[in-house]
Amino acid sequence: MDENNIPYASCADGSPKGFFQLNTKDENYNYIFHAGNDPFDLQMRTYVKNGEVWVNWFVGKRTDSVWVFIDDDLQAINLQNFIGKDPLMESNYNNRKQTDTQIYEAGITAHLWKAKLPEGLKPGDYSIRVMAKDSKGKLFNGFKTFYIDEK
């Protein structure tokens, strides 16, 4: 249950429960995703996993662009789209008890992007600023902090 005593329900691909708002004008259209119980601007989740940065952009398509900036670095890191499983969902499903009647498995999705983190990051706190642009030129932003400990 979430903080409002409503069952937590994300899609198996890592997208939170929510809805689309469709905007039309003449023959043109666009849409925006609204996560049901999250802030309006939640459009993606960002992870640091095995020396890589991963972004699950809930409505991203293979033709869209995603890039990140580490701390105040002005050099963007371009992420590559790939097909895989959302790390949060994979972790959640791996931690659930499997029963004879239910099998829990993270779904495969094509709205994931990843890239290697820069070499030589020293132990400490870092921030990731995510920029994503859809095929119509609309920009979306995300943010994540992470920590590198001494090896």
Image (cartoon, rainbow, N blue to C red):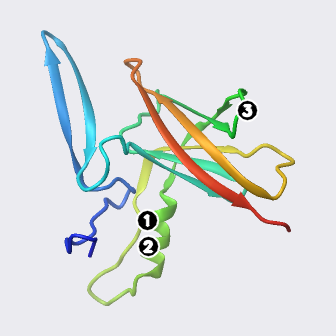
Q: Which residue is mark 3?
A: 73
Dot placed on the residue nearer the N-terminal end, 3 or 2: 3
Q: Secondary structure at mark 1?
A: helix
Quarter of image, res 125: bottom right
Q: Which residue is mark 2?
A: 92
Q: Residue furthest top?
A: 26
User: Is the residue marked by circle 2 packed among few (<14), some (14-19), or many (20+) residues within 10 Å?
Assistant: some
Q: Inspect the image, locate mark 1, and give the three-letter code of the amino acid beneath it.
A: Met
Disc 3/disc 2 C-alpha distance (Å): 33 Å
Residue at horizontal 17 percent and vertical 24 percent from the top: 23
Dot placed on the residue nearer the N-terminal end, 3 or 1: 3
Could you say which disc has been placed on residue 45 in the image? none
Q: Which residue is mark 1?
A: 89
User: Nearest the camera: 112 or 117?
Assistant: 117
Q: Are marks 1 and 2 in contact (CB under 8 Å)?
A: yes
Left or right: residue 11 versus residue 148 is left
Q: Inspect the image, locate mark 2, and give the three-letter code of the amino acid beneath it.
A: Asn
Q: Residue furthest bottom?
A: 100
Disc 3/disc 1 C-alpha distance (Å): 30 Å
